Amino acid sequence: MSPQPQTPLLQVEDLSVDFKVEGGQSHAVKRVSFQLSAGETLAIVGESGSGKSVTALSILQLLPYSTASHPSGSIIYRGQQLLGADEATLHEARGNQISMIFQEPMTALNPLHVVERQVGEVLSLHKDMKPAQARARILELLHLVGIQEPEKRLNAYPHQLSGGQRQRVMIAMALANEPEILIADEPTTALDVTIQAQILQLLKQLQAKLGMAMILITHDLGIVRHMADRVAVMTAGEMVEQASAVEVFANPQHAYTKHLLSAEPKGHPAPAPADAAMVMTVEDLRVWFPIKAGVFRRTIDHVRAVDGISLNVREGHTVGVVGESGSGKTTLGLALLRLISSRGSIQFDGQSIDNLRGKVLRPLRRQMQIVFQDPFSSLSPRMSIAQIIEEGLMVHDKGGDYGERRALIRRTLEEVGLEPGAMDRFPHEFSGGQRQRVAIARALVLHPRFVVLDEPTSALDVSVQAQIIDLLRDLQQRHRLAYLFISHDLKVVRALADEVIVLRNGKVMEQGPAGQIFDAPQSAYTKALMAAAFDLEAIEGGAVSN
């Protein structure tokens, strides 16, 4: 007699989600169906706006009742209907039987409450634990998720924790009541590559220990490949393909799945002449921030954010700077642009600029530009795209009269792949990738020689990342631009950089040609970074330590 098929733990059938918008309804999710078995990991993948998170939030009925509705669908957990269930039923399920790790822990955690109170609240609501009992359980959970010296973290606020520590607290909250299902919504997107590996390793270990089923929502296919049993691919609110992870990667069926798989950063920078003109030369650069204490605020020590770095950037070349958060990457970029004070020699086009200030430095500002990590926060919401790009021209008295400036802006938008007709629209009317193109256009319109690119692709979907990388390579070849490319994504750095500098705690761990760094890293730290980025199977073996 053949064994009876296992009843799914969770069954989602024909689920649709609409949102009220001005003038009608937006169809965010369209008749989605999937199942989840006990102990299984289902990855839901797709780009921003595909409906992944909306689908996950629907399971626990966390969408706002005032704007969201479900025209069709059924969500059954252990035979019980959750869609439209009463508050008592949902209260029992939320955080107890089904838990969720949200994408950005800094916004998901309450900034006014300490760690003990936030994790303890879950235990109080569902287990009615007394304070002493809850504290013992909280310490057990913090230890379980790898928080070092958990006793010292009980009274810490979210802003006093690192990104990885905040995410671990979120995981501790989600696991407090040992749920049967864990929904992890982009749990590693905002984290450094080594911290990503630690969190993923932790989730796999906890899943095995507790026997949880997991829904993993992500756009990172590298994570999916090594974490998921099955994959569901979403685009434009529809689930277009479902299969085992092995089948999806070996033989994708839908055109969109093939598009996602082909969109990961690829290729290498075009070879630039070794004798290209030197644009930036830096020797023994230091940026130290004083630590003051006492009544008289005397300096007792320094934070050595950048500590003795030397580098050269040539015309048409890219120097990639990699390292974890706090390693000094962004501080280095700001120091080179003379946006913060530093010590050491900085030469731009053969001219010493390390002692220049104010009006003397301003003429050089046009030739040194920066593209920031988050285009939404770096573009003024009150200015149109034309005004944003025009601002630099007006500051430096370039571009001619109004009509000539508009023509230049139009040409620059075309060059970065945007419709010139969109120049009078505002940033909120564009996608993340389009906003990043606007930020690149703002830098490019001044015809710079040197551009600092500070994590310009980290907030973007994988296919949009690939487009921006191709654009940056094309612009570099066309204009012989020199780039300092800052990133924690080594796949992106490999696709762009001629030379790589590996930073840790303000110091250079390793420096040299990109091929040498990626193919034959010398330092243990660089090897750990490479293992975390390119060999995610290391997650399973615990190759990257906490």
Image (spheres, rainbow, N blue to C red):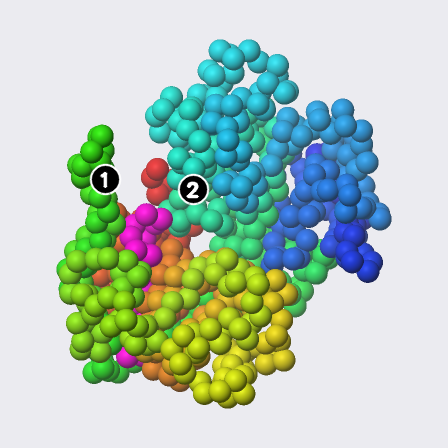
Query: Which residue matches tag 2?
Result: 163
Q: Can residue 373 be found in the magenta stretch?
A: no
> Along the line of sight, which residue is nearer the eye, 35 or 101?
101
Judge left or right: residue 439 versus residue 490. Answer: right
Q: Secondary structure at mark 1?
A: strand
Looking at this view, name the residue that lies furthest to the right. Answer: 71
Q: Nearer the viewer, residue 297 or 203?
A: 297
Q: Say if 202 sits above or below 194 in the image.
A: above
Image-based side of 92 in relation to 428, left or right? right
Task: Tell me which segment is drawn in magenta.
Answer: 315-333
Residue sitting at x 54%, y 51%: 224
Give neighbour class at mark 1: few <14, some 14-19, many 20+ (Cα, 10 Å): few
The residues bearing labels 2 and 1 have C-alpha atoms spaced at a distance of: 22 Å
Report the residue marked by disc 1: 291
- Between 490 and 35, the one nearer to me in the picture: 490
* 399 or 2: nearer the viewer: 399
Q: Specify which label sits upstream in the sequence, 2 or 1.
A: 2
Q: Residue 324 bears which disc, if any?
A: none
The answer to whether residue 13 of the structure is visible from this angle is no
